[in-house]
C-alpha cells in the first residue's frame, strides 16, 4: 500500500472542518483519513486544543450542547 500525500490546502480544509464541527474523529472518518493524522496536523499548525477559557459563554454553551447531542 502506498503512502498517501496530502497538500496544504487539503490539510487546512480538514482542520477548518474539524474546528467547525468540534470533532476530529468525525471529520477524519468522513475524509477517509486517520484521526491521529488529523490531530498531528492540528498540533503542527499550532492550533491549541479546545481551550474553553478563550471561548465566549455562548461558544462554551454551544460546544457543551453539541457534545450532549452526540
Image (cartoon, grey):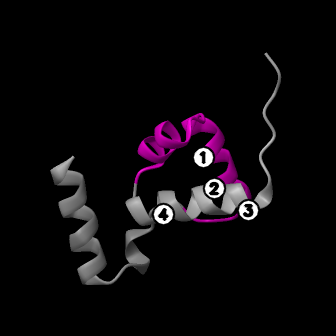
Cβ–Cβ below 8 Å for labels 1 and 2? yes
Separation of residues labelled 1 and 3 (CA atoms): 16 Å
- Residue 31 position within the rendered picture, expressed as x and y whole percent measured from the top left: 55, 42
Give the quarter of the image for residue 3.
top right
Between 34 and 49, which is closer to the camera in this rendering? 34
**In this picture, is 16 found above or below 40?**
below
Give the quarter of the image for residue 65.
bottom left
Name the residue carrying label 4: 19
Name the residue carrying label 1: 39
Question: Which comes before the other along the chain, label 1 or label 3?
Answer: 3
Name the residue carrying label 2: 42
Name the residue carrying label 3: 9
Chain part drawn in magenta? 23-48
What SS does tag 4 mark? helix
**Residue depicted at x 48% and y 63%:** 19
Give the quarter of the image for residue 57.
bottom left
Q: How many marks?
A: 4
**Residue depicted at x 24% and y 81%:** 58
- Residue 45 position within the rendered picture, expressed as x and y whole percent measured from the top left: 71, 62
Question: Which comes before the other along the chain, label 2 or label 3?
Answer: 3
Separation of residues labelled 1 and 2 (CA atoms): 5 Å
Amino acid at each position: 500500500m502506498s503512502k498517501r500525500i496530502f497538500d496544504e490546502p487539503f490539510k487546512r480544509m480538514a482542520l477548518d472542518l474539524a474546528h467547525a464541527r468540534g470533532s476530529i474523529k468525525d471529520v477524519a472518518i468522513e475524509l477517509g483519513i486517520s484521526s491521529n493524522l488529523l490531530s498531528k496536523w492540528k498540533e503542527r499548525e499550532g492550533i491549541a486544543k479546545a481551550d474553553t477559557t478563550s471561548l465566549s459563554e455562548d461558544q462554551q454553551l454551544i460546544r457543551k450542547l453539541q457534545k450532549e447531542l452526540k
